[in-house]
């Protein structure tokens, strides 16, 4: 069988409107995408453009502040639902795959209702409001996606719900600025990596230097830019839950061409859906192999993240 080296676009409007006749077809398409490439686009998701635009604009206003002001925002903290600002080159995603190099050429703002962060800076009330509203929209969409997954897998519609009460999801706005020339040797917008958690829902932006996904054959495929669509991908924790059958696929954000100059700035918004800390990730019954075997032993999400962090830091 030849690998399918494309990322499908799946319209979920009829699922959301309660058209039960269309459910099976949607679930089957999601199942195929998760097995083959671990990525798909969703349209018809009902998340208003206004909610997306507001967070995009408020975050952009922050990123446009002078570095001296931005650096007053905290990069850590213990306030629940606080803000975390990671400056340019702080993170190197390829490091999670053991590849050591310069930091990614990006900066980010991070928020999670159940995650610690720093105090919101003075004058950031509108930014905070925008984060909270977008986060709530992602909670609604991810519940729909979980229900679709359950039908796709052949499990009761609510089988994941308890695992996500008190979830540890994170919402991030990333700014990839126009780039100085030359960049540091080996420096990219975001190095190749897989996502750790359950699922990522990404609002992308179609500018030069965008998201690429690694197909089974190893080739890098440009993620399609479809107006109004979210890009969804399976994370490592979900792959483990499915005994490796649904794939957590490497992806990266490449540099724009040197000549791209103005207009190559890119701002993306990933939402990382994670279960609650004490959720046990145990191979789901329909994915047990012929001999009824799970590839990995059960592990709580908290222990799993600790393990991943240890692996990433060598
Ligand atoms: O900005 C993007 O398009 C993707 C970012 C990403 O993969 C990540 O932050 O995990
Ligand atoms: Fe990612």
Image: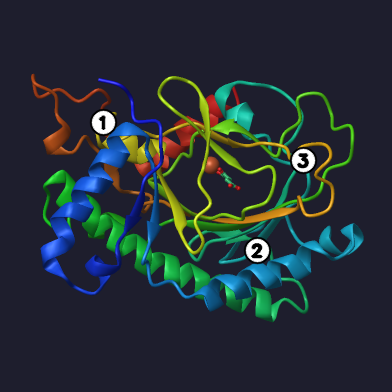
The C terminus: image quadrant: top right
Which mark, residue 89?
A: 3
Whether residue 174 appears in this view of the structure is: no
Q: Position of residue 112 (x, y in %)?
A: 53, 62
Confirm or deny contact between disc 2 and disc 3 (CB under 8 A).
Answer: no
* Nearest to N terminus: mark 3 or mark 1: 3
**Residue drawn at (76%, 30%), measured in percent from left and top?**
187
For discs 3 and 1, the disc positioned in front in the rendered view: 1
| For residue 99, above or below residue 204 | above
Question: How many neighbours does mark 1 have within 10 angstroms: few (below 14), some (14-19), or many (20 or more)?
Answer: some
- Nearer the observer: mark 2 or 3; the answer is 3
Q: Nearer the viewer, residue 200 or 128?
A: 200
Question: Disc 2 designates what residue?
Answer: 83
Q: CA distance from mark 2 to mark 3?
A: 18 Å
Residue 115: percent from left, percent from top: 53, 59
Instruction: State the colouring used for the structure image.
Output: rainbow
The answer to whether one can see residue 85 in this image is yes
Q: Which residue is mark 1?
A: 245
Judged left or right of residue 244, residue 259 is right
Q: Quadrant of residue 64?
A: bottom right
């Amino acid at each position: 069988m030849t690998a399918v080296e494309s990322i499908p676009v799946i319209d979920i409007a009829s699922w959301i409107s309660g058209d039960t006749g269309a459910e099976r077809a949607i679930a089957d398409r999601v199942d195929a995408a998760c097995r083959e490439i671990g990525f798909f686009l969703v349209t018809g998701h009902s998340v208003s453009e206004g909610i997306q635009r507001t967070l995009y604009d408020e975050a952009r206003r922050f990123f446009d502040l002078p570095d001296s002001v931005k650096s007053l925002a905290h990069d850590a903290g213990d306030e629940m639902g606080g803000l975390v600002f990671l400056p340019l080159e702080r993170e190197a995603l390829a490091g999670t795959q053991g590849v050591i190099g310069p930091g990614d050429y990006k900066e980010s703002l991070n928020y999670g209702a159940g995650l610690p962060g720093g105090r919101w800076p003075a004058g950031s009330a509108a930014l905070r409001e925008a984060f909270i509203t977008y986060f709530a929209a992602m909670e609604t969409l991810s519940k729909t996606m979980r229900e679709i997954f359950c039908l796709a897998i052949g499990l009761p519609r609510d089988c994941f719900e308890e695992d996500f009460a008190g979830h540890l999801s994170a919402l991030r706005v990333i700014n990839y600025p126009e780039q100085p020339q030359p960049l540091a040797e080996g420096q990219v917008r975001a190095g190749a990596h897989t996502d750790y958690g359950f699922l990522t829902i990404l609002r992308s932006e179609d500018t030069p230097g965008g998201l690429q996904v690694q197909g089974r054959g190893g080739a890098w495929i440009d993620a399609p830019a479809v107006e109004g669509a979210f890009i969804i991908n399976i994370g490592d924790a979900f792959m483990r839950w499915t005994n490796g059958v649904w794939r957590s696929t490497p992806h990266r954000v490449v540099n724009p061409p040197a000549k791209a100059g103005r207009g190559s700035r890119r701002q993306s918004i990933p939402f990382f859906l994670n279960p609650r800390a004490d959720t046990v990730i145990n191979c789901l019954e329909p994915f047990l192999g012929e001999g009824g075997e799970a590839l990995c032993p059960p592990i709580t999400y908290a222990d799993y993240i600790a393990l991943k962090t240890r692996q990433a830091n060598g």
